[in-house]
Image (cartoon, rainbow, N blue to C red):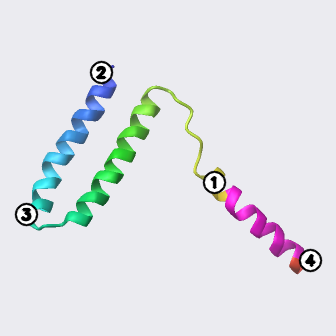
Amino acid sequence: MWGIFFILLIAIAIIMYEVPKMLRNRELKQMLFFFTLLLFGVVLSILNFLHVNIPSPILVLRFVYSPISNWIEAVLS
């Protein structure tokens, strides 16, 4: 439980450090991207802390590029 608390505490500290600068400079698109990446990172960190099995991103790449690789191999051989 304390691990989740510290993850959220660090996320809040990052927000308090970064967001005022973005608001001053009116960087709304960057702020949306920042919050999206921060939320993604916090969720993954909490899931990792809870020992949830998170599949590797390489599996998605294999799924996408495997048919292309097979096609190229068939064409060139």
The mark tally for this picture is: 4
Q: Is residue 67 toward the left or the right of residue 7 in the image?
A: right
Q: Residue at x 52, y 29 (%)?
A: 52
Give the labeled residue for mark 2: 2
**Disc with the residue nearer the chain's start (3 vs 2):** 2
Question: Label 3 to label 4, Cα distance in Å?
Answer: 59 Å
Give the labeled residue for mark 4: 77
Secondary structure under the numbered disc 3 in the rendered image: helix
Front position among marks 1 and 2: 1
Q: Main secondary structure of the magenta part?
A: helix
Q: Residue at x 15, y 54 (%)?
A: 19
Give the labeled residue for mark 3: 24
Mark 4 surroundings: few (<14), some (14-19) or many (≥20) residues within 10 A: few
Q: Is residue 59 toward the left or the right of residue 29 in the image?
A: right
Quadrant where the N terminus sits is top left
Quarter of the image for residue 50 reads top left
Q: Is residue 47 toward the left or the right of residue 22 in the image?
A: right
Can residue 18 be found in the magenta stretch? no
Secondary structure under the numbered disc 4 in the rendered image: loop
Give the labeled residue for mark 1: 60
Question: Label 3 to label 1, Cα distance in Å?
Answer: 39 Å
Q: Residue at x 35, y 52 (%)?
A: 37
Mark 1 surroundings: few (<14), some (14-19) or many (≥20) residues within 10 A: few
- Spot occupied by residue 69 in the image (x, y as percentages of width and height): 77, 68
**Disc with the residue nearer the chain's start (1 vs 4):** 1
Quarter of the image for residue 44 reads top left
Q: Magenta part of the protein: which range? A: 62-74
- Spot occupied by residue 25 in the image (x, y as percentages of width and height): 11, 68
